[in-house]
Structures are given as C-alpha cells and as structure tokens.
Image (tube, coloured by chain):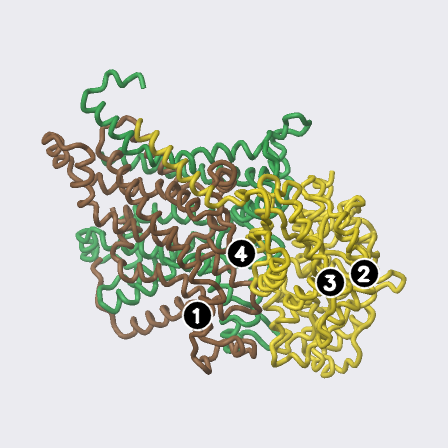
Chain colours: A brown, B yellow, C green
Amino acid sequence: MEPKRRGLVYWIFATLLLLVWISPILASLLTSLKSLEELNEGHYWTLPRHWSLQNYIEAFTVGKFSTYFWNSLVVTVPTVLAVLFFSSLNGYVLAKLRFSWNNKLLLVFLGGMLLPFQILLIPVFYLSNQFLHTYDTRLGVTLFHIAFQLGFASFFMRNFVRTIPDGIIEAARIDGCSEWRIYATMVIPLMRPALAALATLLFTWIWNDYLWSLILIQSDDLKPITAGLQNLKGQWISSYHLQSAGAVIAAIPPVLIFAFLQKHFIRGLTMGAGK
Amino acid sequence: MKLFASTSALISGIALLASSLHSHSAHAAGGELVINSMHSDPTSKKAFETILNEFKKEHADIKVTVNTIDHESYKVQIRTWLPNNPPDVATWFAGNRAKFFVEKKLVEPLDDVFKSAGNQFSQGALSAVTFSGSKYLMPTNYYHWGFYYRKDLFQKAGITTTPKTWDELLADCQKLKSAGLIPIAIGTKQAWPSAAWFDFINMRVNGYAFHMNLLEGKGSYTSAEVKKSMATWAQLVKAGGFPETAPAMTWQEASALLWQGKAAMYLMGNFIASEIPSSVKAQVEFFPFPTIDPKVPTAQVAPTDVYFIPSKAKNKANAKIFMAFLARADVQQKYNAVTGLLPVNNQSKIDANNTFLRAGQQILGQATGLSQFFDRDAEPEVAKVGMDGFVEFMRYPDRTDAILARIENTRKRVHH
Amino acid sequence: MARVGSLSFMQKRDHKTAWRFLAPSLVLYGLYVVFPIFFSLYLSITQWDGLSTAVLPLCKNSEVSCLQNFIDLWNDEVFWMALRNNLVWLIFFSLSAPLGLALALFFHVKSQRASFYKSLFFMPMVFSLVVVGTIWSWFLQPEFGLVEFLLKGLGVLKDGEHFTLMASDKWATAGLIAAASWPHAAYCMVLYLAGLSNLQKNVIEAAEIEGVSRWQMLWHIILPMLRPATVIVVIVTMIGALRAFDLIAIMTAGGPANSSNVLALYMYQQTFENFRYGYGAAISVVLFAISLALILLYLRQTLKDETGRS
C-alpha cells in the first residue's frame, strides 16, 4: 500500500484531529503561563492577560525542580550506560556463543521483561533497607533499574546481534581473536544503531519512572522529577499553574530525545513489529 | 567464576560505601543531638530553624544535626529506623499513631520533663500525650477545625447570624441553595476531609468519650449510636449540602470554590487561613462546628504535633535538654509566630490581630476534650476503610449499613 | 553440568567466556529480579508488619492457616473491585489498538507535513505517566477543567451542571483508561506504521488489480500481513493494563471510595500505607499469577515463531 498524496479536505480533517489529540497538552501549556491570581479569579481558559514565565521560575526555586532534575539525570544516565554495556555483552553471548544455557537464560530475561513488577516491590524495598543498605540513595534506585531493565535490553540486543553473519565472527575466531576483542571491536561498532535505539528507549523509561523512586527514596533532596512533580500538588493552594509548569519541565528531556532521535526511538519500539 | 566473585564483591562494596554515606547512626557519644523532622514544607521548616538557632545559642556545646524528610515518606520510613537506628529526637503526631509506638516500647517516657513544665499545659492537651499514666510526647503546636465562610454570600442569601445548632445549619443550607450557591464546599479526592465531618458529628451526637473509645477500636461501628450519627450526617447529604463534584476535587480545589464565591462555607483546619487570597480576605470569617445535642459537652478536633525521644536514642541526656527547651512558653511562642499555628503551652502569647487564631484559642481552651483527627486516632487500616466508606456514604447515604458493616469487619480483624 | 566433559574444546572455551560475560548481569538480575519473586511468594504467607526483624509464616506457632492472607483476600470487597477493574482495564485499554491502527492508516502518507503531524501525534508516548496524569487531571477537572469549559460553551452542560466523570464511582475508571489510552494509542500507532511500511507491495497491487473493495483489502489482506505487529500490540497492551499504577495513583488514588482501584495500586496501599506487607505480597502474587498465565501464552507463541524460523 503505497502512501498516496492527499487533498485539502484530508489536511483540514487531519489538522482538526491533531488539535483534539494535543488539546490536553495545549491546556497545560496555557495554564502554565498564567498567574495564580488570574486562575483564582476563575479565568481558566482565556488567553493569559499577562504572559509570564513566573510559574517556571517558581517551579525551579520554590518547587526545587533544579534538585529533582539533577537527581533524575544522576540516576538515568549511569543506568542507561550500564544497561547498554551489560545487555550488549549478554546479547552477544545469547546470540553467538555455543552455550547450553542460552535458551533457558533467554526465557529468564524475557520473563522478567513481562512480569508485573509489583511482585518485586516489597522484596526490593526489604533488600535495600535491611541488607544492601542502599535505601534512600540514588545508587539504590540506579542498581535496581539496571537489574530490571537487563531483561528487556538483553532480549533486544540478542535479537540484533543475531543479524550479524556468523561468518565474520568465525573468521575472527580462526584468526585467534579473543571473544572480548570480537565483542569490543567488531560487534559493538556493528551494533551502534541498535545501541542508539535502546539508549533512547531506556532514557525515556528511567526518566519517567515514578513507582520505584516512591519505594526506594525517602529524602526529598534525592527524589527524581516525577516525584517532585507530585510534590507540587498539595503544598500550595489550587496549584495547577505550578503543576502545569512542572509537567512541561518534566516532559522536556524525553521530548527532546524524541525530537532529535526519533528514528532511533521508533526503531527501538518497533523492533520485531515489522518482521 | 572469578569475574562472578569480583562482581559480587564490587556490588557489596558499593552497597557498603553507600550505607556509610547514608547512615544516621554514625554519631559519636558526647555533645551530639540528631533530630529527624517531618516538617519539610517551607513555613514549618523555617519555624523549626528559628528555634533551633535559639537552642544552638543556649547550648553551643551540643552539635545538632537535623534530617528533614517530607511528611508522607516520613510516615512510611519511621518504621524502619525507629526500632533499629533511631535519631535522638523525632517529630510525630499525638494520639493513637503515637500510642502504637509507645506500646511497642519504642518511645522514652518524659515524665521528668513534664514535672517542671506540666502545669503550663491544659488538661485536654496533656491527655493527648499520656498513655497508661505516663507522658511520652512533647506537644509544640496544634490547630483548630471549624467553618470558614463567606460573609458576603451569607448576607446575599439572607442569613444574618452564623448557625449555632444543627437545625440552623440545615436551614441555612436551604437558603444558600435557593440563592444558587453550593452551601458547603468539600473535596474528597483524598478521602480525609470527609472524616472531619464524622469526627465532629459523632462527638456532638454521642460525646467525646464515646468517640475516642470507638476510634481506639473498643466500640462497634454498627452500634445504634454510630448509626444515629450517620443518620444526622445523611440529612445534610440528602439536602444537597455538598457539591456533586466533590470526589474529583482535592481540598485545595474545593477551597477555590469558596474563593470564587461559588460555595459559601467550608469545614477545614486552620491551615487554610494562610491560603486565603487577599482579594477575598475581608469576606472570610470563622464559626465553630454547631451543637447537635445540647446535652453533650463540646469537644473539638485539634491535631497536635509532638516531639519524642526514641527509647534507643544514643544521646538521651541532650534530647531531654531539648525537650525541656521545647516545653518553654517563649520557645513555643516564637515557633508558632512562624507556623501560624497555636502554641500548646498556655503561657505563650499569640498574635492579637489574627482573628482566626484568637477564635481557635478560645474554642480549644473551652473544649472538654480534644480529638486528633480520625486518621490519627483510629488504627491506619481502619482509618483507610473508614474514610473510603465516608466518601461512598456522601454519594450514597442509603448504603450506611453496608458501609458501617465493612468498617466494623476491619475493626474486628485489626483489634481482634 | 555433567555434560561438560563431552563438550568440544571450542564449546568449553565458549562456556567459560559466556559465564564471564554474563556474571555481572546475573548477579544483579538474580538479586533484584529472580530472588524477589520467591521472597514475595514467601512473604504472602506471613504477616510481616515492617517493624519486626523476624519474618515468620502465619501458621507457625499459631492456629491461623498459612493461607490466611489469601482467605482474607477472598473476603475483601475492595480486592474483588480491584480485580474487576483490572479486567475492565484489559478490555477497554485494548481499544487503543484499533484506535492506533486507524490513526496509522489515516496518517500513512509520505510528505514532510505528514511526518510533522505524526511527530506531534507520537508525543504523548514519551511523557511520564505522572505527566500524563497531571495533564489529564486538569483536563477532566469537573469545576474548572477544559472539557467542562468546552461542554459549557457548546451548551451541552447547563448552568449548575458539571462534567462529573471523575467524581463518579461508575465512570472514573473510564476517565483513567481514556487518559492511559492517549499515550498508548500513539504507541500502537507507531507499531502499526512500522508494520504498514513493511507490507508486501506486490500482494496489494495484485489485489488492487482484481478490484477488491477497501474494506476487503483491510480485513483480508492488510490485517493478516500486520499480524506480527498485532502480536506485539496485544502483549504490550495486556502488560500495560495489568501494570497500571502511576496514572491511577495520581488521578484518583483509586477513588471515589475504591471504585477505580486496581490490584497494583491496592497492593501498594495495603503495603506502604497500611503496613500489611504480607497481605500486600499476597495481592502481588495474585497479580503475578494472572500475568504469568498471559506470559506463558506469549512465550509459547514466541518459541513457536523462533523454531519455525530457524
């Protein structure tokens, strides 16, 4: 089905559809640019009388968004790097080594990717608290995220490594290359697009996490931006103006990632869907 | 397998490092004092810093460390550090929430501290910190609950005096409704605002002692007395006293109804006073919850913040010094000048221009009993089932029996 | 590993390398994912309150059955309400799949403008559910929200009437599913667009020459060819419906009066708000069992596909 050129009626309808689709976003943007006074007077859905970035400034100062933003970054970036590294190792083993546990391990990783993580909540809370003493540290959240994401990521990388022809790897082995060198100098460069796709996905997922920071972090100063956004609620009266600004701020990094790496992002998501 | 071993070593090493960075327990003996505080919002944080600076001036030899943890997390976390590695002083709530820890022997008695300062606290306030004869908690502030109403809207509906009795309240609601207003604002997206209604009505109908007994888990929710309270409440619900949109609103959103002149009154705690927008400040006033049965003495809802010493604290001597400091009238006065709440020490002075505070001090001073609030007095599980039940009741008042039976089942299971 | 002796030299070397490469992952994964599953199974037969240091089974030293938590669950109205809502989620959240397909078919156009439109359509997909929940709470707010404002403007709601969707114990779940479907339909749209771009063109051209109707083309030719995409859409939808937590916690917290509660949220509330760790674990075990049934179905399918291909 070759995409066809479309006429004016199509575009009018498409534009209307788009406006409806993004109206929740527009509503939030509009509110975020209004002052509390204007909202308190009941002017919710008219254009702001005074356009103002005050709410954004307040989210950062009063709402401590700079702290939350930093915390999200400190958890997200190392998690993504660690998962990329470990999962590509796993992917290589699962796809290219003659290893009798391959199928069983693949099942274990696949199972973890699909399981409802509620079953992990209490034990991980208990482990971090009583045993690892990583409770209420950013490290604790990071370690958990790395472990949990390994399920999907290993499966993902394994599927991509499989597409490398066995021949070139065999040739390198015959030349006496160690498996580590094959992995580091041949597989990784070939995997670059897959790693980029996986990285964008992981970044978005970790950045957007809420539940695990709720369970594993207690100090306000260590909370990520999703929890910070929740904090804006309830501390100030009818705080939708601040919440809207906070929602926009929290959404910016994943939206930027998406805007610039759309191709990778979509490739990551659609892995397998097009086969 | 070498890599396996080294990786596990690495992970446990990282964990160890993290725990040493994180631990609260690393305080040496001597001049130290570690305080865990749940007062993380800007105002109460500032209030606490004010008196802390005062304390540091008076006791320069004591090195004070404060860990501020936000309210909601604190409630969850206290269970993990209190039995194992507690600070020297911790903040908490009075009432059953504290009783739970007292019964587990996790709280140090403060009878010696109160020996010198006890006469500066009212009997009502002391009853909230006393368990089986001993005093365990140092109350620093409380606040009152009651109706915040719009004077101008009452006038518009032809109401000249605020309601003193339940019947007057019902009649006023009718007038406000005819004037096209929502009589009483409430938002039950978080269930707790509904519980204030139960607290007040049950205390006004059945008395303070009955109510406290019920919340302690000793009375039955399916008793004729509780049913009578619910029937009283149902009158107001069925008369359309509350907005139908209540379950989708937080308490802040509901208060916007008051500020915008859509609703005429609001049963709330005095923390709302600092949130009144300047544009309507002149129109908002206070009246206490009306009488329902004139034979029942008047009790009030007054959630009280307290400080206590965990029984496993390392620097108990310093902690006691701090407790004696907190008990002082001048300290509580300075503290609450910032918080905007009422000092519990009855020698402390309050801002004479603040009409809300004056009203609060008056009704709490006259009260024959002070309850802490449903979810502080009742066991957490019962409180959750209860408050969810109240929200359901406010929509379906005819389901009273089923709702009460559900709360009663939970109470029976929790309190065997 | 008795078979190791019979392995060739190359296989032995591979085994050693494999363990070495996998070790860090297996340690972390075992600690944080595999072990916790068994620990939760164990906790579900205890009554741990989070305070005591020893965690003992319920039936030890008492007359209570070890399965007491599950018996309590059976008698817990809120549990059944949550379970029912999970089923409602499974059914209606799945509607984002046909919605995503419809959008994909509609926007399956090649032009600069179309890619721009598509990007905007995809955007909700990258939002945190906390952001989605915050935005939609505001959108659906019954007194001041945009929907209320628009309905008032169009005259659908008269004075004194309100858009009470989220205040209704019957309809709040519908509002939640609508909010959740917003990013999820975008996700399904992406998956289907990828599927569409990989269709075998010759089959479609042949069908066009034979003059089949558009509906027949969609139903008998395009949909069967999109099957791989559909399999993934169904899986992610099922998992998403069962995991639903963030959005509900933010938009209704399970209310009004638990009418929009689901197992994942109820488990959290019982555990971390009421401190019934054993009971919470029991709820998570039920949730786990449901998912396991679905996962096993999927794994069987995947393995069938894998063996079919190699």
Name the element at disc 1.
helix
Q: Say which amino acid is labelled 4.
A: Thr
Q: Say which amino acid is labelled 3.
A: Ala
Q: Which residue is mark 2?
A: B299
Mark 4 vs mark 3, CA separation in Å: 52 Å
Q: Which residue is mark 3?
A: B329
Q: Residue at x 75, y 77 (%)?
A: B175
Q: In which chain is the residue bearing label 2?
A: B
Q: Residues within 10 Å of mark 4 (few under 14, many from 20)?
A: many
| Residue B247 image point, x, y percent | 61, 62
Does B47 sit left or right of A181 as displayed?
right
Q: Say which amino acid is labelled 1.
A: Tyr
Q: In which chain is the residue bearing label 1?
A: A
Q: In which chain is the residue bearing label 3?
A: B
| Residue B94 image point, x, y percent | 71, 53
| Residue B309 image point, x, y percent | 66, 47
Q: Which residue is mark 1?
A: A56
Q: Are marks 3 and 1 in contact (CB under 8 Å)?
A: no
Mark 1 vs mark 4, CA separation in Å: 32 Å
Q: Residues within 10 Å of mark 3 (few under 14, many from 20)?
A: many
On the rendered image, what quadrant is the N terminus of chain A found in? bottom left
Q: Which residue is mark 4?
A: C173
